[in-house]
Amino acid sequence: MEPLKHRPKNHVEWNESYYFVFYDLKQGLGGMTRLGFKPNKKEAMTFLFLPDGSAAGYQAVEETGDYGLQGLRVGKVVHKPLPEGVWKYFFEGDMIAVRNPEDLPRTRGNPSLASGVFPSRVELSLTPISEVYEYSAHMTPESRMLGEKSGDEHWEQIGIVNGEVHLGGETYGVEQSMGQRDHTHGVREWTSIDYWLYYVVWFSRELAVNPAAIIMGDGRVSTGGFLFEKGRNIPIERIRVLEQEFRDEVIPVCSRLELVDGLGRRHVLEARAGPVIPVPFTDSEKNVSILAQSFGSFKLDGVEGGYGSFETLRRKPRK
């Protein structure tokens, strides 16, 4: 396992974050949780996408001192590493539920959008099936330079998820589902990036793909990620966006990417986003970026059946 905590740099937006995503294909149940630590604050997000198309979420922001002396906890969200690389993810508290996932961030200003506030408990474990993959070790100097506003180092690992999710009066058993964790540290300035995409896509225990790219306004691309094939992590060396579609300029609809892997093979990944939770970030100059969290459907080289997270970050044009 990679080193889990790093000394903060002297930058107000230095960040160390821990992310977990899972999807139970049989039930149509998915979720994601993120802890972010900065020298002057810490934040947590936990979202669930439910089988009926609705969503529920929890967010917390707290001041912190030296987070290195604490466990990986913010509010009611806990990420806990265990021996042999297993991770536990735990939440117990109230979640706000909405029928339309896009309404979830708006409930703070308009509580009438919520369909209810429900006692919830999430207790899941992730058992790795892949080696830890470190993005930066496989990125070109140009890609690292272009990606400097999204973290110095970035680790990913695929695993199998088991446990239970309780929301209101419903209980969902999660058995042998696909999941993935990531861990990054470095400067994270949400509003300084024109556009990024980050997909976590599973086809089976033998095939997955995790492309990530920061796309600049002049067309330059910072490429990261890997193809997981028969137990092996194969770097993605180049990403080219062939097609993309957004609604209202920031809500993802679909995309088509060309990926070139470390073996020189060309792949085409087609993606379509499902329901979206759009999380806004605003800086001191009133610039706004929207982090869109979604689960989508995917096709790789004509092979259908891929599923997983479809995440984008887009800066809203100023009017």
Image (tube, rainbow, N blue to C red):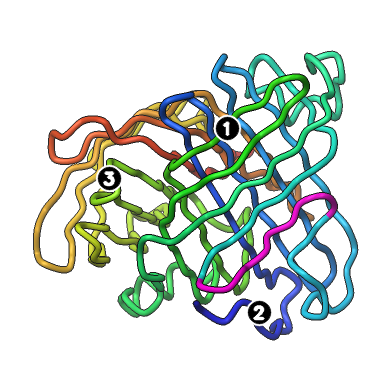
The residue under label 2 is: 5
Residue located 75% across and 46% down the image? 91
- In percent of width and height, residue 143 lies at 36, 70
Residue 182 in the figure: left or right of residue 12: left
The disc label shown at residue 173, or none: 1
Residue located 40% across and 47% down the image? 200
Q: Nearer the viewer, mark 3 or mark 1?
A: 1
Q: Amino acid at mark 2?
A: Lys
The residue under label 3 is: 241
Residue 118 in the figure: left or right of residue 87: right
Q: Amino acid at mark 1?
A: Gly
Q: Are marks 3 and 2 in contact (CB under 8 Å)?
A: no
Residue 82 in the figure: left or right of residue 104: left
State the separation of the CA atoms marked 3 and 2: 34 Å
Secondary structure category for the residue under label 2: loop
Q: Earlier in the sequence, mark 2 or mark 1?
A: 2
Rendered view: 196 above or below 8 = above
Task: Let me know if residue 80 is in the magenta part.
Answer: yes
Task: Let me know if residue 318 is in the magenta part.
Answer: no
The segment highlighted magenta reads 75-84
Decide: few, some or many residues near mark 1? Use Cα within 10 Å; few <14, some 14-19, many ≥20: few
